[in-house]
């Protein structure tokens, strides 16, 4: 089943209108990046449909969901999906109003999926609404460094 079919089926199941911008990105079945920044997934079910695409693409290495108005619940569901993902190495979540609980989930992701070597929540180039406490942010960065060293060695 193609990524477009996976997405359309999920949208039909959850009664969501497919996002044309996302559909346009789903042409290549071996797609290694999903750049979906500055967008809005829609309702809670809209994000569930996006997760179906992420789960259905075992080749996906880079995911950029910056500036998508993600909630703590969205991040929790994303982390649950990415913990099991076989290829993802990079996750960008800049400017999403993420707080302590989302930070704890991202720390859990860095610990449980050692393929993850980048989790970006702060971008100096743009205004950022994320409020992950510095202590948790530093713990995430330490885990990511451990993952990078483990992969290099």
Image (spheres, grey):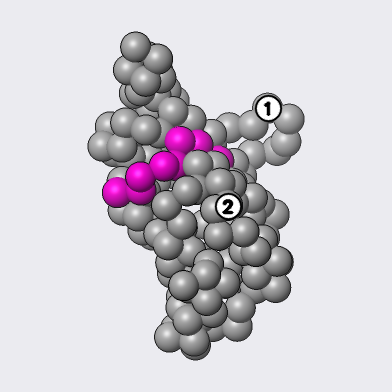
Evaluate if marks 1 and 2 touch, with contact meaning CB atoms under 8 Å apart: no
Q: Secondary structure at mark 2?
A: loop
Q: Nearer the viewer, residue 1 or 69?
A: 1
State the residue position of label 2: 31
Q: Is 86 within the magenta?
A: yes
Q: Secondary structure at mark 1?
A: loop
Residue 54, how many percent across, how many down? 46, 58
* Nearest to viewer (mark 1 / mark 2): 2
Inspect this view and state whether residue 131 appears. Answer: no
In the image, taking residue 70 as reference, residue 79 lies left or right, namely left
Secondary structure mostly seen in magenta is: loop
**Which residue is at 47% across, 81% downward?**
9
Vertical placement of 132 versus 147: above or below? Answer: below
Q: CA distance from mark 1 to mark 2?
A: 28 Å
**Which residue is at 37% across, 40% downward?**
106
**Which residue is at 57% across, 72% downward?**
4
Residue 116, how many percent across, how many down? 40, 33
Vertical placement of 56 versus 106: above or below? Answer: below
Residue 59, how many percent across, how many down? 47, 48
State the residue position of label 1: 124
Residue 42, how many percent across, how many down? 58, 72
Mark 2 crowd level (few <14, some 14–19, many ≥20, 10 Å Cα): some
Vertical placement of 64 versus 116: above or below? Answer: below
Tell me where the magenta segment starts and ends, as one range.
Answer: 84-93
- Give the position of the C terminus as an image quadrant: top left
In the image, taking residue 3 as reference, residue 115 lies left or right, namely left
Q: How many marks?
A: 2
Mark 1 crowd level (few <14, some 14–19, many ≥20, 10 Å Cα): few
Q: Is 38 within the magenta?
A: no
Q: Mark 1 or mark 2: which comes first in sequence?
A: 2
**Which residue is at 43% across, 86% downward?**
13
In the image, taking residue 141 as reference, residue 120 lies left or right, namely right
């Amino acid at each position: 089943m193609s990524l477009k079919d996976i997405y359309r089926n999920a949208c039909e199941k959850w009664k969501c209108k497919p996002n044309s911008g996302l559909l346009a990105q789903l042409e290549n079945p071996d797609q290694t990046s999903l750049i979906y920044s500055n967008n809005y997934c829609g309702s809670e079910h809209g994000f569930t449909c996006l997760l179906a695409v992420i789960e259905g693409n075992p080749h996906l290495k880079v995911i950029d969901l910056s500036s998508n108005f993600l909630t703590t619940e969205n991040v929790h569901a994303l982390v649950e999906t990415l913990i099991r993902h076989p290829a993802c190495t990079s996750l960008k979540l800049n400017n999403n109003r993420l707080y302590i609980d989302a930070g704890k989930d991202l720390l859990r992701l860095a610990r449980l999926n050692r393929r993850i070597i980048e989790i970006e929540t702060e971008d100096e180039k743009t205004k950022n609404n994320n409020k992950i406490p510095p202590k948790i942010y530093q713990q995430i960065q330490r885990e990511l460094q451990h993952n990078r060293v483990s992969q290099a060695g």
